[in-house]
Image (cartoon, grey):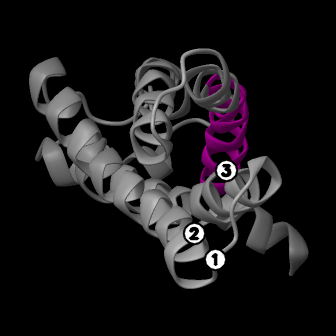
Amino acid sequence: MLRALYQRFSHLLREVAKFGTVGAVAYVVQLATTNLFWSVLGTPLLAGQALGTVCATVVAFLGNRYWTFGHRARTGLAREYVLFFLMNGVGLLIQVGCLWFSDAVLGLDGPLARNIAGNVVGVGLGSLFRFWSYRTWVFPARDAAEPGTAPAAEAPASRA
């Protein structure tokens, strides 16, 4: 039974693992650049968070397009890029909303509160949305985007 479950969901597990790896790299970029904007450049709170996220988004797009979802349908670089950034815009709103709530509603300010609200809670909730939206709209399964081709789930098991 466990083997059957693994075989059924192995492609999803690989995508989740790759998404997590790309996300971890992008997260380090986001943390470093956000804190650089806040601490070194004196950028305002929400603007620094947004700029750090934009830098991480470029890294995430490249990693997800060419590695995480590289086996899925190619629907055009421009289309994927626009949708990726739109979905990240929604993820950014989730992230900045968490930061705003912590600061304006809960009255929690300071480096630790900022990082927990924006970079832990916000990134976590935004990441759940991003994974779902990338699989659904940005990098669709081959059968959904290209009629007549084999679905991505039927791809050979040797793919990593």
**Which residue is labeled 1 in the image?**
107
Residue located at (49% from left, 41% from top): 49
Q: Earlier in the sequence, mark 3 or mark 1?
A: 1
Give the quarter of the figure containing the N terminus: bottom right
In front: label 3 or label 1 = 1
In front: label 3 or label 2 = 2
Q: Dots 1 and 2: beta carbons under 8 Å?
A: yes
Quick one: SS at disc 2? helix
The relative height of residue 53 versus residue 133 in the rendered view (above or below) is: above
Q: Is residue 137 visible?
A: yes
The relative height of residue 129 versus residue 142 in the rendered view (above or below) is: below
Give the crowd class for mark 3: few <14, some 14-19, many >=20 residues within 10 Å: many
Disc 1 residue type (three-letter): Gly
Residue 35, position in %: x, y? 67, 29
Magenta part of the protein: which range?
11-29
Residue 46, position in %: x, y? 43, 47
**Which residue is labeled 3 in the image?**
119
Disc 2 residue type (three-letter): Asp
> 137 or 45: nearer the eye?
45
Q: Earlier in the sequence, mark 3 or mark 2?
A: 2
Residue 116, position in %: x, y? 75, 59
Give the crowd class for mark 1: few <14, some 14-19, many >=20 residues within 10 Å: few
Give the quarter of the figure containing the C terminus: top right
Q: Which mark is residue 103?
A: 2
> 118 or 13: nearer the eye?
118
Q: Main secondary structure of the magenta part?
A: helix
Q: Is residue 67 magenta-colored?
A: no
**Mark 1 and mark 2: span between their CA atoms?**
5 Å
Residue 134, position in %: x, y? 37, 49
Residue located at (39% from left, 52% from top): 92
Q: Dots 3 and 2: beta carbons under 8 Å?
A: no
Quick one: SS at disc 1? loop
